[in-house]
Structures are given as C-alpha cells and as structure tokens.
Amino acid sequence: MGFAKKFTRFIAVLLVVCVALPFALPLDASANIPARRTLRIGLNYGTTALPSANFINGVGSGYEFGFYDANLVFHPVAATAETRISVMIDHNMQWNPSAEFSGQYFSVGTGAPAAGSAAVGFIHWRISSGHANAGDAYAQIAEIPDGFIRYNAGHANPFMPIYGNYTSDTEANAARRSVHHTRDAGTARTITVAVMGTGNVIFEFDNTANPALIFGIRPINDARPSTHFRGDQYFGGFRFERRVSTALTVVNIVELEDYVQGVVPYEMSPNWPLEALKAQAICARTYALSQLNKHNTAHGFDLCNTMDCQVYRGRNNASNNSNTAVTSTAGMVVTYNGALAQTFYVSSHGGASENNENIWAGTPLPYLRGVIDDYEDRIASLISNYNWTITISQEDITARVRNAGHAGASTIATLRVSQYSPTGNVVSVVATDTNGRDYTFSRRAGLQSLFGATPLRSQRFNIGAVTWQPGSAIFVNMPALSVNLNQYSAITGSGVSAVSGSLMAIDGSGNIVNVAGGGPSVTEGAATGPVNGNFIVNGRGWGHSVGMSQWGAYSQALHFGRTAQQIIQHYFTGVQITTT
C-alpha cells in the first residue's frame, strides 16, 4: 500500500517542550537563574548549513514531525516508522552514496539528476486543496504507492494529500493520475523528508510564518530514544529551517543535562579525574544558562557547537566517568551574589589567569580576577603546546601595524611590553617605527592583530630571544626586575623550607597581590629589535587566560586532592556553587 501506510494517521497527544523564543526569560527567584532547561544548539548553520541531513535511529522506532507554536507547545502532525531518513530542501535532489557520513542528497537545481541515481524531484501533484485533519488527507492517498502528506502550517486546511516527485514537467505530466489534480512545487520554505538513499518521499513541511520543521525520535519500550547525525549520536529533537533557500539550518533541541553530557567529554578527556570533570560540568552548565539566545538574532538558536560557545557533539565520547561527573552535579551552577557567573575556561594559563578587563575591554567583573596557577607546573610536560614561540619578520610586523589603521607607519624598529598585569601577563605592547612613532596594541584583540590570532596562544609571553623561566620568575611592585622564587625560604612547623606555591606582596597602591609563578625574564618596558630580520616571541599557555584552566583543574584533582568546588573557587573569586 506504499509509504503512506507507515505514517501514524493522527497523533492526538501534544508533546509539550519548552524552547527558546525572543522574549524575557523566566527566572529562578532564589538565585536569579533562568528557569528554562531546554536548549537550542546550532549544529549546522550559516556557511555550514546543509542541502540535506541524514538521521539514523540509535535507539527508537522512527520519527515524529511537527512544529512549535507561539506558546511553546510541540504539535506532532505526522510520524513514520522509518528509522533511516533524510531531510532536505525541496529542489531536484540527487543522492550521492560516496559523500561523507553515509551519503548525502545534493541539489541539481532545476536540472535532471544523473541517470540511475536515486533522486527526489521538486514537482508533485496535489489531489485536493487540503483537509483540516490528517485522517482525511491520508484517506485520499491510501491506495497511492507514492502518496504522502505535506503540512502547510498557517492554512485553514493544512493537511495536503500529495503524490509523486518529479524532476521535470515532462516526467510529471506523464505520471499525472487525473486532470483534476493540481501541479504543486512547494515554496522556498518547503522541507522534504525521504527514506534515506531512495527517491521515496514520506513527508513535506511548509510554514511561511514560522519556517521550522521539528522532529522527535519515537521511543521504543522504556529505552531513551536517540539518533545518529553526521557520525554523532544525540538525545532530543531536531529543528530545520531554510533561512536561505538552498540550505538547511540544523538545530538540536536538547535538555540541559543531556547537553552538558555532550559537552564535558569534548572539552575535557572523559578519562580525567572525576573532580576535574565535575568542575567542567558545573562550568559548562553555568555557561550555557548564562548565554541563552547568544546566536538567536543571527541564526535562531541559543548556542553553537564550536569553541565559540562550547564544543558539543552529543553522546559519542561520553564515558561512565564523564556521565557521572554530570549526574552527580545535576543542577549545580556557579553564582556570584545570587546571579549566574560567566564561567569562562581555557586549556591552560601558562602560570596565571587574568582579570577580564585586561583581556577584553569592558566592565571588570569581581569574580574574574587573575590568580596564580602554579598547579600547572606539576604537569607542564603533559600539556601539548604549553610552551610556544612565534618568529615573525620585521616586514610582517610592519604590515600588521599598517593594517591595524596606521597606514603611515614606517618600518617597525622595536617592540616592547608597555604593561604587565600584577600576575605577569601582558596587557599592552608598543611598536615603534624608524621615525620614533609609537603604536600601542592592547588586550587580546589588539595583541592578536599585531602577532596573529593563531600564533599568539595566550597573553603570557615575552618579546626577544630570552628563555622562558617556568615556575621561577616573579614580579614585585611592578615594574620591577625578575627574581628567582627558589632563593626564598620560610620557617614552617617542620623547620626551614623553600617557598613554594603562591607568594603575596604589597603593590604600589597598597593592595595585597599574588606574585608567585612563571614570568618573562625581562624587565617591563625593555625595547627589543629584530634579530636577523625577525622578532621572537616566547610564551606559555593556550587560551584567553580568563577563568578556569582545564589542565590546572586536572592537576589540582589528581595531585592535590582538591574537589570540584575548591577548583572552581580557586579560579573564580568569591563565587558560590548553587543547586537549582
């Protein structure tokens, strides 16, 4: 009886799912924390949007299709028992079995697909003008092998009985079953669902007012349903939009704790110490809730799945260890004075984190203060790219200065660090040209424009061919000379011992500051010229230097027995762990 028989005739139960829309977020009154716990995570969008997307049940018995209304209610309108489906734009589409991730449909525009290949055409025949309910529409295609339903949201009679998919009018006219049937080619918003790798259409969706098809995974017995997409396995549902007519934006609609389980094993090794993973889980959960709607204006979702937000790729890398880290901290977030903190984190600091205003221009946040991170020294040999060197020619530096808005600069003669922070990170560098004119580059954006975003891995560096001294150099009452931490001793309960760990000093403003840890072995303000035509930059650490060091967390958990709460409170000054 054809693929129409594989659909549920009508789904009476509405699935209520909370999804982000551009309105004020409800708050948890106890801690000023957004109450929403369902996230929209962008998987493919913008330049990575897809002509088609394949889905294979990991655990489940097929898929349900529908949409969200303005009240955040999910309306299922059709379902299929097929467990391998492809969602695509409504063009002439040709299946390429050799494409990555088990093949893919590609658009051939209005042209004809190659002979012998599976194809889905954009021309159809509509049997009637539509029905108010699914049952009547399915009745009209019950005896048609290639019949399917299109749901036209917003119409008084949205269930359209359709048959066939043809790549040309000649092909369509030859297959027309009645003169009363109307040629139908969908719109620039129409989304087609087919059995993966075939020419068999099983559902179409069109919604000009809210052009997003949603599908959920049908459960099987008591097992939690999941699906595979592009080699990764996901919980939750998916949303598709043709934000441009030739490609699909793919969004995973996922519960917060499931999302965190898909972040932790990609931001840290899932086999790391449990307390480090728990710290990562708490930070990831807090970051997600603090960044709701980050990409809403541009792309219609909360967070992306890359390092711009947090790396998220579903279930593949999850281990019992990483899942335990998430479940044992469920609902825990980092707060400061009752509000969510911004829990930034990086791979490594190179010796010290930094005040947020010294990295990004903006308001200083009291919990994002630079702290000495001498825990990294214990495991520095394990950290990939911990020590790094940039060699950049005098010509390149000059070109970068000019491209930064100083077109009149002559050849750059010297570079010098014009400001170190109290924890020994670079805040600004001055480039001086052969005419004695100075050009200042400050904070992360400015320094990356001078040295390059990828080569400059952190703001903990010195300029010149000087060996970095990990864990031995400190600064007191900046600016000052570098001195060796190992020359200091203190009387302890067990006798005289060399000083290790954090050392405190009173700076020029009377503030007590941390001063221990690695640093550049040069004096602040020293100008350095090129050697053999090249400037040399030596540095440590990898990341923006704000918040938690992941490798520092690893060291604290493994070698110092510190808990997730202690790790977080080391990196985020004055914060609390709140359970929502």
Image: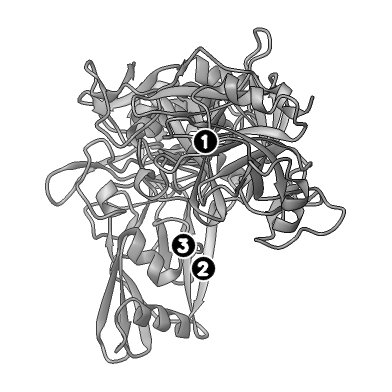
Q: Where is residue 152 in the image (x, y as percent from the top left)?
A: 50, 36
Quick one: SS at disc 1? strand
Please state if 78 lies on the left or on the right of 284 as rendered.
Answer: right
Q: Which amino acid does label 1 sit on?
A: Leu
| 338 up-or-down from 368: above or below | above
Whether residue 276 is visible to the viewer of this picture, yes or no, is no
Circle 1: is it few (<14), some (14-19), or many (20+) Cα within 10 Å?
many
Q: What's the colour scheme?
A: one colour
Residue displayed at 37% across by 32% down: 20
Residue that lies at the very extreme toward the front in this rendered image? 179
Residue displayed at 43% across by 34% down: 155
Please state if 488 lies on the left or on the right of 369 as rendered.
Answer: right
| 160 up-or-down from 526: above or below | above
The quadrant of the rendering that contains the N terminus is top right
Q: Give residue 213's mark.
A: 1
Given this view, does label 3 or label 1 mark the residue nearer the observer? 1
Whether residue 162 is visible to the viewer of this picture, yes or no, is yes
- Residue 531 versus residue 27: which sits nearer the camera? 27
Q: In which quarter of the image is residue 499?
A: top left
Which of pointers 3 and 1 lies earlier in the amino acid sequence? 1
Q: Where is residue 567 in the image (x, y as percent from the top left)?
A: 41, 28
Which of pointers 3 and 2 lies earlier in the amino acid sequence? 2
> According to the image, label 2 marks what residue?
390
Q: In which quarter of the image is residue 293?
A: top left
Quick one: SS at disc 2? strand
Which of pointers 1 and 2 lies earlier in the amino acid sequence? 1
The quadrant of the rendering that contains the C terminus is top left
- Residue 365 versus residue 209: which sits nearer the camera? 209
Q: How far apart are marks 3 and 2 (CA)?
A: 7 Å
Q: Do the residues labelled 3 and 2 touch (CB within 8 Å)?
A: yes
Q: Which amino acid does label 2 sit on?
A: Ile
